[in-house]
Image (cartoon, rainbow, N blue to C red):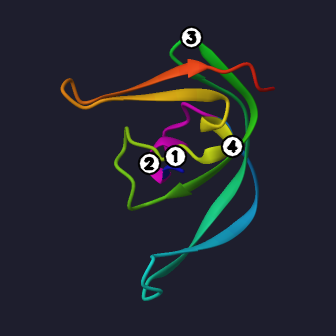
Amino acid sequence: MLSEELRKSGKINPTITGNIAFGGVDGTMVASVPCGRISQILIGPYRYENSSVCFATNVGPTDGLVGFDFLRHFNWTFDYPDGKLILTPNGLN
């Protein structure tokens, strides 16, 4: 999930394939957002190619929500004192 503002900025060039309905956990809010694929995302030194992405107006302009399909490729270390999540590649392809 990335911001609609980022999509409109032209900094990325997604191929939009349709809309998906997202809702909150209580079921009271449902939004239809454009989704598709982008050729690659670089997060630090890690490259993630041909990834699915959706765009929403309630995500900050420089914020995003990374899903499990990306996170499953890493071992996670929660560094609570420093407020960090450390991702270490686990070798899954």
Report how far apart the C-alphas of labels 3 and 1 lie in the structure: 26 Å
- Residue 50 versus residue 88: which sits nearer the camera? 88
> Image point 37% across, 38% down: which residue?
62
Residue 26 screen position, x and y as percent = 42, 84
Secondary element type, mark 3 = loop
- Cα distance in 3D space between marks 3 and 4: 18 Å
Count neighbours of disc 2 (C-alpha within 10 A) and say few if under 14, some if 14 to 19, many if 20 or more.
some
Lateral position of residue 81 relative to residue 75, left or right: left
Which comes sooner in the sequence, label 3 or label 4?
A: 3
Say left or right for 29 vs 18.
left
Labels 3, 4: front one: 4
Could you say which disc has been placed on residue 69 in the image? 4
Distance Cα–Cα, label 2 vs label 1: 5 Å
Task: Give the residue at mark 2.
Answer: 5
Q: CA distance from mark 4 to mark 2?
A: 23 Å
Residue 39 on image: x %, y %: 75, 30
Residue contact at pointers 2 and 1, CB within 8 angstroms: yes
- Which tag, 3 or 1, sits closer to the chain's start? 1
- Between 29 and 68, the residue placed more toward the observer is 68
Nearer the camera: disc 1 or disc 4 = 4
- What type is the residue that disc 2 sits on? Glu
Type of amino acid at the residue the image marks with label 1? Lys
Query: If you read the primary sequence from the N terminus, does the residue marked by circle 3 or circle 2 appear first?
Result: 2
The three-letter code of the residue at mark 4 reads: Asp
Q: Is residue 60 above or below residue 27?
A: above
| Residue assigned mark 3 | 45
Q: Is residue 68 above or below residue 35?
A: above
Residue drawn where x is 68% and y is 43% of the image: 69
Q: Residues within 10 Å of mark 1 (few under 14, many from 20)?
A: few
The magenta segment is 4-12
